[in-house]
Amino acid sequence: MQTLRNTELDALQAAWPQHMQRAIQLAASVFSAAPNPRVGCVIVGGNAEAGDSVLGEGWHQGAGLPHAEPVAIANAIRLAAGSTAFVTLEPCCHTGRTGPCSSALIEAGVSRVVIASKDPNPKVSGGGIAALEAAGVEVFFLQDFEDGARRLNRGFFSRLERRRPFVRCKLAMSLDGRTALANGESKWITGAEARSDVQRLRAECDAIVTGIETVLADDPAMTLRQAELGLNAQQLVWNELRLSNPPLRVVLDSRGRLSETAKIVTEPGRCIAYRLDGANSSVEASSPIAVRLAPNSGESVSRVSLLSVLESLAELDECNEVLVEAGATLSGSFIEAGLVDELIVYIAPKLLGSDGRPLLGMSGLNELSDAIEFKVESLEQVGADIKVTLRPR
């Protein structure tokens, strides 16, 4: 395999970046393909020089459905010898629910394959590249697209490399950092556009995590509201698998207080409650609540270990991405534990006053140097509100 930077491409390869960018765009057509990665493929005639025609395109829509490469092959108007395939992830080389994509490309007569990232799955992990090269197919790695390709599948890479999902935490507050009035009223701090944007966050995740205190106080449904996603007819078809399999709803319920009549339990889909190992874990066989036991956090014997919960969701449910939608205490605990990979804060242009409820419940600091710092990734206006996306430094 030859590794190339964009600056190293010759005149015959000058159009390669635009084809790879198109493949990444195709992969992003679906909110999620979990537990699989999102993958896009573009097949171009000849050496994929400027002017060479795109023969076929495809992307993966979800587990059990054809992968991006076979879809692009099936969609191809023709497959001329010497064609080039641009794939966002190393083609697989094993048989699971579908056949190996490396074999499909070889059988289609593709002469070269250009990838944007290597597959961390131990079932692949270089095997796809080796299979292609053994068949005489040239393989190139466009290194400048690796960050974008990994970002596209950050949850998949997190689950395979860190054995836990990528964790996104969503918060909403007023200009003065309040999430609710002193009496608990919080509907609604942000506008309809921001709340619709949250539905997209839910559509991208595999599990929504909240705490029992939020459930007892607000009785949220934590559902994916399709009507608020703003999808056209074609996008609805592309995301049919995701929309018919909504994210898991996970409640951290150390002492077993979750009621079977709570909306988070009764809505269609699966609800999992994590309780402390040794707490009351008895439920009726017919109960809609799936109870799992977790050890305590170490810092507090009355709270479940957040890392253990995440590792469990990765191992047992193959969750790539998790969205934390919780109150000040649980959200603060995730941040203090260093388990939040992306923080999204919606800021409403209103003031709630000093007696309003704070954004986070976290330990106080004695030194400013101990502050938990974030890097602002983006600022975006969503309706009347501001959406701030941050990453830990």
Image (cartoon, grey):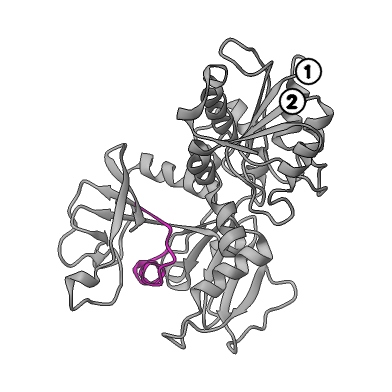
Query: Residue 53 location in percent, x, y?
Result: 64, 12
Magenta span: 326-344
Q: Tell me: 129 left or right of 345.
A: right
Give the residue displayed 56% in from the left and 29% down from the top. Answer: 20
Quarter of the image containing the N terminus?
Answer: top right
Q: Tell me: 95 left or right of 114.
A: right
Q: Kindly identify which residue carries mark 1.
A: 81
Q: Is residue 162 magenta?
A: no
Query: Residue 234 location in percent, x, y?
Result: 61, 26
Q: In the image, what residue type sits under mark 2? A: Ser
Image quarter of residue 38 = top right
Q: Tell me: 28 left or right of 126.
A: left
Q: Verify CB contact (< 8 Å) between mark 2 and mark 1.
A: yes
Label 1 neighbour load within 10 Å: few <14, some 14-19, many 20+: few
Query: Residue 309 location in percent, x, y?
Result: 56, 71
Q: Is residue 359 above or below residue 35?
A: below
Query: Which disc is residue 38 wearing?
Result: none
Q: Kindly identify which residue carries mark 2.
A: 111
Q: In the image, what residue type sits under mark 1? A: Ala
> Is there any visible trace of residue 119 in the rendered image?
yes
Image quarter of residue 392 = bottom left
Q: Earlier in the sequence, mark 2 or mark 1?
A: 1
- Give the secondary structure at mark 2: loop
